[in-house]
Every structure is written in structure tokens, then in C-alpha cells.
Image (cartoon, rainbow, N blue to C red):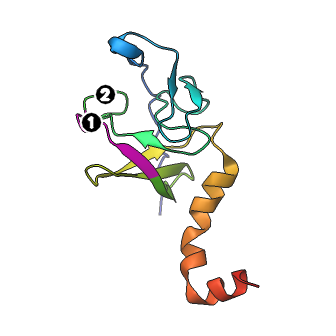
């Protein structure tokens, strides 16, 4: 059976995102959970949308990353991680205001301990593992 060619991914396009107060261009935003000032530039992604320390996000993007068209503006808590077929990790966020779930790419400067905590959460909830973790 012939092998299929791996699909080449298109690079992310840069978008003009308005983060400043009053809708002007900004170079950072403040996390609504931990109050850390977060720079917009992030290694590994063109659209910074979550805090690298606590992984909290805001519900601002509609259908396309970086479009900022969602009207909810609720806080989104990181509830889990998943991986694409190519091995890239995605954060699963849950909006605390409207209940919507969304998947967002992790950035290169995200807190590795917080990511591993999210990844280990299902294992800690299983009965055989939870007894061994208590020891």
C-alpha cells in the first residue's frame, strides 16, 4: 500500500488584534485570574489568547483565532489538554459564563507544571491510580 504524503500545514497569518483599553493596539494584556501582565508575542503561536502562568483565557474569539468577535467576554478556565495527530498539544477551555468549550494551541512559554497537572487529572480520578497517589 503506498504511503500518503504528509499534509503540509499553512503557517498562521498575523492579524491586527486590538488589546489596548478603548480598542487601540496594545503590546500586552492583564490576566483576569492571576493579574499577570502577559506579552502578546508567544513562541509557537501567532495569537496569544491565554495566560502562560495559570492558563486562564477570556472568551473573546468567535470562529477564527484572533478575530475577537465573541460578545460573551467571560473567563475561560483550562479544564484539560488533548493532542493532535501530529503530537501538538491543545488546551481545552470552558467558559464560566456561557459554558462553551474551545480548544487552543499551547504556547512555548506556557507553565509546564500546570500543563502536566491538567494532563494527569484524568489518571488521578481513576480508582486504581487514586489509591496509589494517596500513599
Residue 82 is situated, as x and y percent measured from the top left of the image, at: 50, 58
- Main secondary structure type of the part rendered in magenta: loop
What SS does tag 2 mark?
loop
Query: Is residue 32 part of the magenta span, yes or no?
Result: no
* Residue 27 seen anywhere in this rendered image of the structure: yes
Label 1 packing within 10 angstroms: few (<14), some (14-19), many (20+): few
Mark 2: few, some, or many residues within 10 Å (few <14, many ≥20)? some
Q: Are marks 2 and 1 in contact (CB under 8 Å)?
A: yes
- Give me the residue at 31% from left, 28% from top: 68
Residue designated by label 2: 68
Q: Report x, y in % for residue 5.
A: 48, 46
**Residue visible at 40% across and 47% down in the picture:** 76
As drawn, is 26 to the left or to the right of 37? Answer: left
Identify the residue position indicated by label 1 in the image.
62
Q: Nearer the viewer, residue 91 or 72?
A: 72
Residue at the limit of the structure toward the left, as seen here:
71
Q: Where residue 43 sits in the image (x, y, percent)?
A: 62, 30
The magenta stretch spans which residues?
70-77
Amino acid at each position: 500500500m503506498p504511503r500518503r504524503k504528509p499534509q503540509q500545514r499553512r503557517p498562521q497569518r498575523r492579524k491586527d488584534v486590538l488589546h489596548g483599553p478603548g480598542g487601540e493596539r496594545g503590546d500586552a494584556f492583564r490576566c483576569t485570574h492571576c493579574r499577570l501582565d502577559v506579552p502578546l508575542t508567544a513562541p509557537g503561536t501567532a495569537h496569544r489568547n491565554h495566560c502562560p502562568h495559570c492558563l486562564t483565557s477570556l472568551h473573546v474569539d468567535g470562529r477564527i483565532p484572533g478575530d475577537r468577535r465573541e460578545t460573551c467576554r467571560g473567563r475561560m478556565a483550562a479544564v484539560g489538554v488533548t493532542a493532535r495527530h501530529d503530537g501538538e498539544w491543545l488546551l481545552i477551555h470552558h467558559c464560566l459564563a456561557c459554558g462553551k468549550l474551545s480548544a487552543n494551541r499551547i504556547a512555548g512559554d506556557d507553565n509546564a507544571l500546570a500543563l502536566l497537572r491538567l494532563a494527569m487529572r484524568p489518571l488521578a480520578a481513576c480508582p486504581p491510580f487514586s489509591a496509589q497517589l494517596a500513599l
